[in-house]
Image: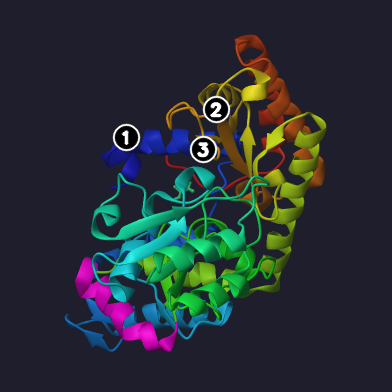
Amino acid sequence: MTLQTYDPIIANALQAELTRQREGLEMIPSENFVSTAVLEALGSIATNKYSEGYPGKRYYGGCENIDVIEQLAIDRAKEIFGAEHVNVQPLSGAPANIAAYEALLEHGDTILGMDLSHGGHLTHGHPVTQSSKIYNFVRYKTDAQGLIDLDNLRAMALEHKPKLILVGYSAYSREIDYEGIKKIADEVGALTMADMAHIAGLIAGEQMNNPVPIFDLVTTTTHKTLRGPRGGMILCKAKHAKAVNKAVFPGLQGGPHENVIAAKAVAFKEALEPEFKIYATQIKKNAKTLEKEFLVRDYKLMFGGTDNHLLLIDVTNKNLTGADAERALDLAGITVNKNMIPDDPRSPMDPSGIRLGTPALTTRGMKEEEMKQIAMWIDEAIINWQNADKLAIIRAQVKEMTDKFPLYRDLKYV
Ligand code: DSN
């Protein structure tokens, strides 16, 4: 029985979501569109199999095909990033980070991580998380120019003697000096960890610095710029391999999601193709075009601009909040997310900023010309955020553009 016949409510919701993805401009910087090959692996019969353990060492019989899949995912990830060891089982970014802490640290140890409002991540020590109750997080911030000040980081490292220095961000838009940070870590005897979730695809495409050969341990999601299925991964030095594997299973997780791992393997094959480098290059070119277009329209770009795929914009000088802007842009067919800005005086549900990026639009084939048009629409929507008619007109124009960049042409649920 087909999905449509058996469960029409779900089929209809999936069809409506497909239409939303097709007709809108997806600009949440952590989102992307996987290939149909990745989708096929994700929806495969590999979901039926239990396989606790690792390739060649499983707690269940019948894992011979699963071993081929998981080993290939591991080997390809090692090749992309130059890693000594990779664990592809983390279910997503948050569990990957928890497993990473558990692998390297004792409870109560000090971790130096970036403040959330300055571009860090919840799992880097925000007080609402479980990890913040287990470890002693000390949080650094960007400086007045919106950059990571290594002198300040060094002073904090000397003062707090962390066991781990953590970098890698979810709203920070600048390059990261891994060598400089490693030097500080070595001086104070700290381990190093990078969460490269947002920029993994840009690193794979050789458009940003790669922390993997330098740092002790690197975590990532696989579904952002890397354009794979929703999932996580840990890459580390060989000396941490055993601890990392133990921390993921049996420390934190049970049966790995082998359909997701199969889809990761397919996405990694794609990331090894020469076209992926072109994709990563275009992501950055598109973001730079947006940067330029917003600057001429007097938008306040956090961190002064972008070196990667995203922009964090304070919209309060346009007389609305981040939540107002997100709502208005939604009505105009442009999806972004409201976001805190550094030391935001407003609340997380109604912050001062919006965060937007180019990975998904670049996957659709959009380039600089489209970015210029899109920046114009975003500006119009923000200026007219209370004018439903104007927002509807923009939405119709957005649909005209997205029709020219077809998405999942042959896919249908209803
Ligand atoms: N939720 C992700 C993001 O949007 O950046 C980070 O986990």
Instruction: Pinpoint residue 192: horizontal percent, then vertical percent.
Output: 46, 73
What kind of element bears circle 2? Answer: helix
User: Is the residue under label 1 in contact with that under label 3 (CB below 8 Å)?
Assistant: no
The span from disc 3 to disc 2 (Cα, nearest Å) is 14 Å
Pointer 1 residue: 8
Residue in the foreground of this view, choosing between 110 and 286 = 110
Examine the residues drawn in magenta and state their main secondary structure. Answer: helix
Q: CA distance from mark 3 to mark 1?
A: 46 Å
Does the rendering let one see residue 350? Answer: yes
How is this picture coloured?
Answer: rainbow
**Separation (CA) of disc 2 from disc 1:** 36 Å
Foreground of the two, 272 or 236: 236
Is the CB–ligand 1 distance for label 3 below 8 Å?
A: no
At label 2, the amino acid type is Gly
Residue 278 is situated, as x and y percent measured from the top left of the image, at 73, 64
Residues at circles 2 and 1 in contact by the CB criterion of under 8 Å: no
Magenta stretch: includes residue 243: yes
Of mark 3 and mark 1, the one earlier in the sequence is: 1
Badge 2, how many Cα within 10 Å: few under 14, some, many 20+?
A: many
What SS does tag 1 mark?
helix
Residue drawn where x is 54% and y is 21% of the image: 324
Q: Image height check: is 112 above or below 300?
A: below
Asked whether, in this view, residue 394 is left or right of residue 191, the answer is: right
Q: Dot 2 corresponds to which residue?
A: 322
The residue that label 3 is drawn on is 343
The magenta stretch is: 237-253
Q: Nearer the viewer, mark 3 or mark 1?
A: 3
Kind of residue sitting beneath label 1: Pro
The 10 Å Cα crowd at callout 3, few under 14, some 14 to 19, many 20 or more, is: few
Q: Nearer the viewer, residue 139 or 262?
A: 139
Q: Is mark 2 within 8 Å of ligand 1?
A: no
Residue 150 occupies quadrant? bottom right
